[in-house]
Amino acid sequence: MKKYLRHTLCILLMLAVLTGLFTGCTSSDNVEQQPYVSEDCCEIYYIDNITQMLKAENVIMDSEKQNEQVLSLFKKLSGIAKTEERSGVVPRGLEINSIYIDNGTLTIDFNAVYNSMTSGEELAFRAAAVYTFTSLDFVDYLLITVDGSELKTAKGMLMGKLGREDVIMNGDISAEPTNYEILTLYFENSEGSALSTEIREVQVNPNLPVERYIVEQVIAGPEDESLRSTVPYDTKIRDISTADGVCYVDLSVEFVNKQLGLEKDALAAVYSIVNSLCEIEDVTKVQFLIEGEKLDSYRNVIDLSKPVEPNYDIQF
């Protein structure tokens, strides 16, 4: 058995999926301790929709092999159905590529669907995954990789292995306070002839890149009813990072496949993202990627094989 008690845990969250904020808590104040249970009993974690807290459900392991236990636990975690009372944390299509266990550290390599999660969804998944897999007797830490690459913090540092104490106290995950950012977002005007701005105050986690929040807000669409959405609503952000003034935005294929065939719609989609991102000081150009690949031509309208500069005066 592990040194700590198995328990039904409620990690106090100030959790909103749009903001991705976790507020740290102490084990003494927010952990309901319960007696030891059988070694073949583990825990899977989900979001209680009423309290907005992570809660645990005990499950019985049906294998003695470590790899099979990990796979079984992930299957059970993925199988949590959404109801009025609770929600699962595993996105549809997320799969395990490989598992490696060494000296108490479980390394799980996930497929690229991991990168489709919003910042809030990823934080919820990461917290639930750490607590779920460390409920196994042979796991003290979880190391997450995606298609072979380790996760990084917003500052570009490797996140490394995570234990329960990290999820509660580590500032890169949960303990940072919320910041507010004033974003200038671009959407199509009511006539469909140009882009207009919408100023929006957004609650952000300072450990995550503001670029992600900007693109998420553009995808979500305008709050002003006089403006029009420009990007297909089911477009996912696979990855986003900025280097030397260029923001690299890797989007899912829906950005292309779900876009209307009109030339102005393609231009509006591209420049609503580019103009919005270039409103922040660190970004001067945007390099688009679709499923990790550059596009020579987007709807035969614009070349996306090279970084795109903003155009604040564009007319359709």
Image (cartoon, rainbow, N blue to C red):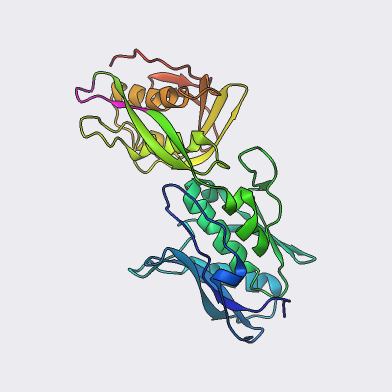
- Toward which corner of the image does residue 190 lie, by quadrant? top left
For the residue pair 191 and 149, the one nearer the viewer reads as 191
Image quadrant holding the C terminus, namely top left
Residue at (63% x, 78% y) in the render: 6
Name the spot of residue 88 as percent of width and height, x first.
45, 64
Is residue 90 found inside the magenta-colored segment of the image?
A: no
Q: Is residue 299 above or below residue 65?
A: above
Residue 94 visible, this angle: no
Instruction: Determine whether, in the image, residue 76 is placed left or right of residue 83.
Output: right
Image quadrant holding the N terminus, namely bottom right
Residue at (68% x, 58% y) in the render: 162
Instruction: Determine whether, in the image, residue 186 is placed left or right of residue 97.
Output: left
Farthest residue toward the front? 29
Q: How many marks?
A: 0
Residue at (37% x, 44% y) in the render: 234
For the residue pair 174 and 294, the one nearer the viewer reads as 174
Name the spot of residue 286 as percent of width and height, x first.
51, 24
For the residue pair 254 and 57, the one nearer the viewer reads as 57
Name the spot of residue 94 as percent of width and height, x first.
52, 56
- Toward which corner of the image does residue 256 lie, by quadrant? top left
Q: What are the residue bounds of the magenta stretch?
A: 185-192
- Toward which corner of the image does residue 99 lie, by quadrant? bottom right
Residue 31 visible, this angle: yes
Name the spot of residue 30 as percent of width and height, x first.
54, 70
Residue at (58% x, 21% y) in the render: 245
Q: Is residue 108 above or below residue 115?
A: below
